[in-house]
Image (cartoon, rainbow, N blue to C red):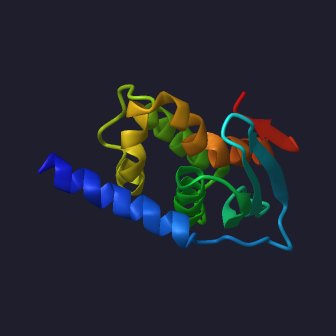
Amino acid sequence: MMDDLRELYQEVILDHGRHPRNCRRVDDHSHAAEGDNPMCGDRLSVYLKIDEAGTIQDAAFEGRGCAISIASASIMTEMLPGLSEADARRLFDSFHLLVTGQDINESDADLDKLVVMSGVRNYPVRIKCATLAWHAMTAAMDGQATATTE
């Protein structure tokens, strides 16, 4: 049973890695940041369009990286539209706990789509790959131009 689940998760990651969603530039973005993972060579740009009320209207990314970083960015950009900045930060905090193997709030339904990345916790060097786009997203919301995993 666990092998079937692991295989399903790997298939989802590979699908997002090969066919990333929202892999584009948002021309009318209000926030953007570059993410760099020098250890793996991943480099991503994250674009957010946030309205005056603080709601994310659009999220996208461009760049290159391993399947894990691209899949994570793809899933993240699918989840962000409609969230407030505060909710996006909470989602990142929960995601970080998930991939680092720490206790998470089981009632966090938003993590359902992200659980496919939970196996990353078994490969500590890959955690930076999985969280790169998320660090770039928070840097963009903070008005910072860059984020690094180092």
Q: Based on the displayed image, in which of its 4 quarters is residue 9 positioned?
A: bottom left
Q: Which quadrant would the C terminus be assigned to in this image?
A: top right
Q: Position of residue 99 (x, y in %)?
A: 44, 36
Residue 11, by quadrant, is: bottom left
- Determine the residue positioned at 63% across, 45% down: 134
- Please name the residue shown 39% across and 25% down the image: 102
Work out whether residue 33 or residue 40 is closer to the camera in this orientation and state it: 40
Q: Position of residue 7 (x, y in %)?
A: 27, 56
- Residue 86 showing in the rendered view: no
Above or below residue 51? Residue 44 is: above
Percent across and percent down for residue 18 are 53, 69
Please, which residue is most extreme toward the left here? 1
User: What x and y, as percent, mark residue 47?
Assistant: 77, 61
At horizontal 52% and vertical 45% (from top left) the residue drawn is 91
**Is 139 placed left or right of 74 in the picture?**
right
Residue found at x 62% / y 54%? 84
Q: Is residue 122 visible?
A: yes
Left-right relation of 97 to 143? left
- Closest to the observer, 66 or 30: 66
Side (left or right) of 42 relative to 28: left
